[in-house]
Amino acid sequence: MTSPSEQLLPGTQRALLHRIATAQSEGRAPSLAAAVQRQGQIVWSGSRSCVDGHAPDADVQFRIGSITKTFTAVLVLRLRDEGLLDLDDPLEKHLPGTGIGGVTVHQLLGHSAGLAAESPAPWWERTPGALRPELADVLGEQTQMHNPGRRHHYSNPGYTLLGALVEKVRGANWAKVLQREILEPLGMHRTSPQPQAPHAGGWAVHPWADVMLPEPAEDLGLMAPAGQLWSTTGDLLRFAAFLAQGDGRVLCAASVKQMREPAAPAESGDWESNYGLGLQLARRDGRTLFGHTGSLPGFLASLWFSIEDDVASVVLTNTTSGLMVGGVAADLVKIVAEAEPRIPEPWRPLPEADVDAELLTLTGPWYWGTNANILRLASDGGLDLQPMRGNGRGARFAPQPDGTWIGLNGYYAGETLRIARNGDGSVNHLDLGSFVFTREPYDPTAAVPGGVDEGGWRGLGA
């Protein structure tokens, strides 16, 4: 079953349906629901079920497991944006008594705090949260597995601590803060800590026989900020649109962009995936995907979105294992992005009032030694410096009040670009982190470090 869509070609719709049908069949999942969003609009949804006539629609809740962590991360970033904490603050500054030393908020968000991956036995996902009434019960005796900040080590207890941090600073229950600060503003009315009908039941499928066993759906208690939520394909695509663009009612574009930046070194040899602040990062088929996967007994979930393609996908299923939902969701993005590539916006010149004549004179070729670069005036008023050939160092720059420019990405991220002038006010060269860029290769009239040989350029026999 699939909903009609006038925005996708029939061939694209069939390819999407074929992908989820194959996933449900080969993964032996009781049911599966999926949806795709393009340019902020849901353009396709589909589902499959082992029971004829009972395929879930876009309003049926599934448990989403660790996708919950992304919501918790947003709540923490909101505290930072309000000036109530700094990401480099030790957790102990705001939540004393945890016994984890100087571990910072940033390290907890990016899973580089060195904490254990799981809480002590019994298995927290299949037992009541009441068994772990205090943070000490979640952390156990061996809190540190690795030195903080040295490596990525995924930690569910780490996000329990972040949920407790939110509660301490806000003075309110995590779930209530989540409802007030994220779910209500984004219109996510079918996302909740507890299941609300209609919702799927969780099942374990026997690995060697076509039989099923119902899975318990426990309240996770203090572990809720790490994996408690239930949601739908429609609600999660609303969340994906927010994570791609930001929303002033929840978190600004700059802060959600920070969530998408790698927070710690990737595992050795693993250059295709990384972790930001509450978001997973992956390279698949030449594109960068952001989002999160999730699992709890009886459920698997995945949310991926591509900024470049402006396409997002969600896959939800009610089986404990056997189906690689992350790969399926990535394939749905790929199908739409490649079958129907994004149509670029029309080129338009800057409004006349936005043209800065002085900046315009800076555009064009600049040379770092003999390396040729092009400086362009971007449509947002920034500067874009890129190598003329090859994959050399390039970056975007944003203006600063003192007349300098700050690098936003690449090798020059955070570096200062200064315009060095002659006594008469004319431009002599550009200074970028001590590198001198001149209008001609080794321009003798510019302040080139080491000077320029008086004999000038010469041939072999000179």
Image: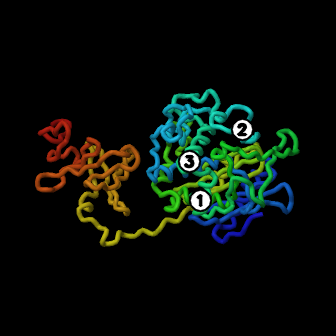
Q: Quadrant of residue 88?
A: top left
Q: Amino acid at mark 2?
A: Trp
Q: Residues within 10 Å of mark 3 (few under 14, many from 20)?
A: many
Q: Can you say whether 233 is above or below 390 in the image?
A: below
Label 3 vs 1, first from the N-terminus: 3
In the rendered image, is residue 397 in sight? Answer: yes
How far apart in space, not on screen, are marks 3 and 2 (Cα)? 21 Å
User: At 25% from the left edge and 54% from the top edge, which residue is drawn?
Assistant: 402
In the rendered image, is residue 264 in sight? Answer: no
Q: Position of residue 43 (x, y in %)?
A: 64, 66
Q: Can you say whether 461 is above or below 407 in the image?
A: above
User: At 11% from the left edge and 52% from the top edge, which residue is drawn?
Assistant: 423
Q: Amino acid at mark 1?
A: Arg
Which residue is most to the front?
A: 171
Q: Position of residue 413 (x, y in %)?
A: 38, 46
Q: Nearer the viewer, residue 174 or 382?
A: 174
Query: Which mark, residue 180?
Result: 1
Q: Amino acid at mark 3?
A: Val
How far apart in space, not on screen, are marks 3 and 1 (Cα)? 13 Å
Query: Which mark, residue 327?
Result: none
Q: What SS does tag 3 mark?
A: helix
User: At 61% from the left edge and 47% from the top edge, which residue is drawn?
Assistant: 69
Label 2 vs 1, first from the N-terminus: 2
Label 3 vs 2, first from the N-terminus: 2
Q: Position of residue 153 (x, y in %)?
A: 58, 34
Residue identified by numbered label 2: 124
Classify the position of the C terminus by image quarter: top left
Residue identified by numbered label 3: 166
Q: Position of residue 419 (x, y in %)?
A: 23, 51
Q: What SS does tag 1 mark?
A: helix
Q: How many marks?
A: 3
